[in-house]
């Protein structure tokens, strides 16, 4: 049964990215309430992902990358940047969301300009890491 969790986690990561992009488009169109709902959906999806990821890896352990040649440096570069930025994004997202909910627009905007692209990168690379590990170069 644990074999479905990597796909579930990748889906949650991707869905978070879709919610983020939708929220970005909505705020550009000055639809503040809809932006807020999609940002809260992105936060919720990311929190569910984190809980699911930790639960899965506490049972399954780590997965070794089975690729060779060009795929190894590409994979490990993606993994390293994804992991570092996933840790960096947590406080940035908390600060951004907190200021947005308090309608501290200028502070929210200042943090969101950094948070949004990093969070999108983490969402996209999370899905790519899944494909590298489980679809394109699965261990035998």
Image (cartoon, rainbow, N blue to C red):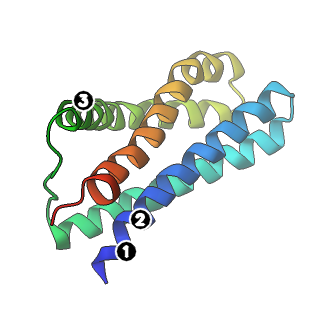
User: Which residue lies most toward the front here?
Assistant: 69
Which of the 4 quarters of the picture holds residue 90? top left
In terms of sequence position, does the residue under pointer 1 or pointer 3 come before the other?
A: 1
Query: Could you tell me which quadrant the C terminus lies in?
Result: bottom left
Residue for point 56% across, 49% down: 16
Q: Are marks 1 and 3 in contact (CB under 8 Å)?
A: no
Name the secondary structure under disc 1: helix
Q: What is the crowding at mark 1: few (fewer than 14 residues within 10 Å), some, or many (at least 20)?
A: few
Q: What is the C-alpha distance between the residues marked 1 and 3?
A: 25 Å
Instruction: Inspect this view and state whether residue 114 appears.
Output: yes
Q: Which mark is residue 101?
A: none
Compared to 109, does 19 lie above or below?
Answer: below
Q: Are marks 2 and 1 in contact (CB under 8 Å)?
A: yes
Residue 73 coordinates in the image, percent (x, y): 19, 30
Decide if residue 111 is on the left or right side of residue 38: left
Residue 9 coordinates in the image, percent (x, y): 41, 61
Name the secondary structure under disc 2: helix
Residue 78 coordinates in the image, percent (x, y): 30, 33
In terms of sequence position, does the residue under pointer 2 or pointer 3 come before the other?
A: 2
Compared to 120, does 67 lie above or below?
Answer: below
In depth, the one of 39 and 131 nearer the eye is 131
Q: Which residue is mark 3?
A: 77
Residue 100 coordinates in the image, percent (x, y): 66, 32
Decide if residue 77 is on the left or right side of residue 51: left
Decide if residue 35 is on the left or right side of residue 20: right
Q: Which mark is residue 4?
A: 1
Q: Which mark is residue 7?
A: 2
Name the secondary structure under disc 3: helix
């Amino acid at each position: 049964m644990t074999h479905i969790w990597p796909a579930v986690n990748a889906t949650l990561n991707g869905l978070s990215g879709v919610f983020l992009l939708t929220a970005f488009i909505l705020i550009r169109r000055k639809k503040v309430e809809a932006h807020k709902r999609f940002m809260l959906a992105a936060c919720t999806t990311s929190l569910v992902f984190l809980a699911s990821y930790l639960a899965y890896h506490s049972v399954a352990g780590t997965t070794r990358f089975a690729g060779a040649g060009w795929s190894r440096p590409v994979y490990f570069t993606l993994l390293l940047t994804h992991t570092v930025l996933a840790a960096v994004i947590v406080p940035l997202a908390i600060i951004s969301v907190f200021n947005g909910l308090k309608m501290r627009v200028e502070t929210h905007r200042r943090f969101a300009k950094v948070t949004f692209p990093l969070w999108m990168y983490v969402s996209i690379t999370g899905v790519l890491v899944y494909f590298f590990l489980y679809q394109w170069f699965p261990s035998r």
